[in-house]
Image (cartoon, rainbow, N blue to C red):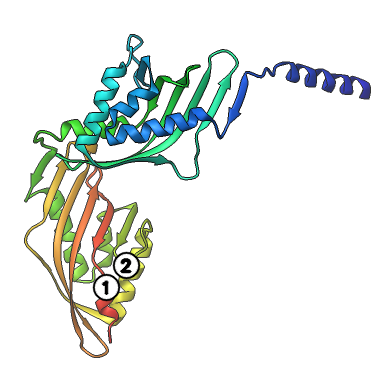
């Protein structure tokens, strides 16, 4: 039995080894990498003379995210025009390696040398103010004359969708100054004013999350934690009034289908120990689900004034 197991293991190793087939060599330093990165820097500067010198006459630039099988990509002239457009219309334009990533040059045995890059493109569109801040992955094919004949790009096309849509005014839903969800926020805050904690938090889902400016970025509280914090505050402070400042807005967005109430308040409290009064300006943003329950509260306020002696 033991011999059978050994023989089986040997056969498995032989099969696995026979499946390997070398198809070239990978380099982290290579003249082709220098060609690609130098061309990219010339591209963002709009130096089309320099860019043209790195491209073959049959050059094609291909969008790797395009699933149209008939797409032929952009030719050399079109690519040079893109360089002019980017350099003239994008302020603070830069391209650099992404973090610790570095390009690879792959010398294949048959198809030639490919360079793959992992970069970051940053800039701001001059007319619309749209910020471009995205990773981009590219594959470049280098011919025997060290000229770039193919460039295949994989990037975040949604940024360009936003850019194209920013040239003309567009709506993004409806804005209300009276709505059922506004009424719920008013009732919720009124319950807080009267220290009716159970009623106030009954407007939230069990999994609702809370945040404010005193919390570290990304940190949130649960309903239980927020309720506990409010009750702890009531031990040392009396709520004199919570007054709406202006009027709340309800925004029913088209993009993302978000349902949001924004409201502005003056929280007036008095410390029990010495009668010190504090007025805290507060902006609240509440997100509602389709059932009309609050799923998220973002509080733009700080209670630092309450800690002062």
| Above/below status of 72 relative to 136 | above
| Residue 76 or residue 119, whichever sits in front | 76
Q: Taking 57 as reference, is 309 left or right?
A: left
| Residue 236 or residue 52, whichever sits in front | 52
Q: Please give the name of the residue rendered at 47% of the width and 18% of the height, measured from the top-left corner.
A: 145
| Residue 309 or residue 170, whichever sits in front | 170
* Residue lying furthest bottom: 274
* Neighbour tally class for label 1: few under 14, some 14-19, many 20 plus, Cα within 10 Å: some
* Neighbour tally class for label 2: few under 14, some 14-19, many 20 plus, Cα within 10 Å: few
Secondary structure of the residue carrying tag 2 is loop
Q: Quadrant of residue 244?
A: bottom left
Are discs 1 and 2 less than 8 Å apart at CB?
A: yes
Q: Position of residue 66 (x, y in %)?
A: 34, 19
Report the residue marked by disc 1. Answer: 303
Secondary structure of the residue carrying tag 1 is loop
The number of callouts visible is 2
Quarter of the image with the N terminus is top right
Q: Position of residue 129 (x, y in %)?
A: 18, 43
Report the residue marked by disc 2. Answer: 214
| Above/below status of 124 relative to 136 | below
């Amino acid at each position: 039995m033991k011999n059978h197991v050994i023989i089986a293991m040997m056969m498995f190793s032989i099969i696995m080894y026979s499946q390997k087939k070398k198809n070239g060599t990978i380099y982290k330093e290579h003249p082709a990498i220098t060609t690609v990165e130098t061309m990219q820097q010339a591209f963002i500067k709009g130096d089309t003379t320099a860019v043209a010198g790195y491209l073959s006459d049959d050059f094609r630039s291909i969008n790797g995210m395009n699933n149209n099988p008939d797409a032929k990509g952009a030719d050399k002239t079109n690519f040079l025009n893109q360089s002019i457009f980017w350099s003239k219309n994008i302020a603070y334009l830069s391209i650099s390696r992404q973090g610790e990533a570095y390009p690879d040059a792959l010398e294949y045995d048959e198809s030639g040398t490919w360079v793959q890059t992992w970069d970051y493109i940053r800039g701001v569109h001059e007319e619309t103010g749209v910020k471009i801040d995205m990773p981009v992955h590219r594959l470049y094919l280098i011919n025997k004359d060290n000229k770039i004949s193919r460039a295949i790009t994989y990037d975040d096309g949604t940024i360009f969708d936003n850019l194209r849509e920013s040239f003309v005014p567009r709506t993004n839903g409806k804005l209300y100054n009276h709505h059922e969800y506004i009424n719920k926020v008013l009732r919720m805050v009124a319950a807080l004013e009267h220290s009716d904690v159970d009623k106030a938090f009954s407007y939230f889902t069990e999994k609702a999350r809370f945040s404010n400016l005193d919390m570290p970025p990304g940190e949130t509280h649960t309903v239980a934690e927020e309720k506990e914090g409010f009750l702890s505050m009531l031990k040392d402070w009396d709520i004199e009034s919570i007054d709406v400042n202006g009027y709340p807005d309800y925004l029913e967005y088209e993009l993302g289908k978000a349902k949001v109430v924004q409201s502005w308040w003056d929280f007036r409290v008095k410390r029990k120990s010495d009668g010190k009064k504090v007025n805290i300006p507060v902006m609240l943003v509440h997100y509602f689900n389709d059932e009309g329950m609050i799923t998220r509260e973002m509080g733009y306020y700080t209670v630092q004034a309450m800690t002062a002696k």
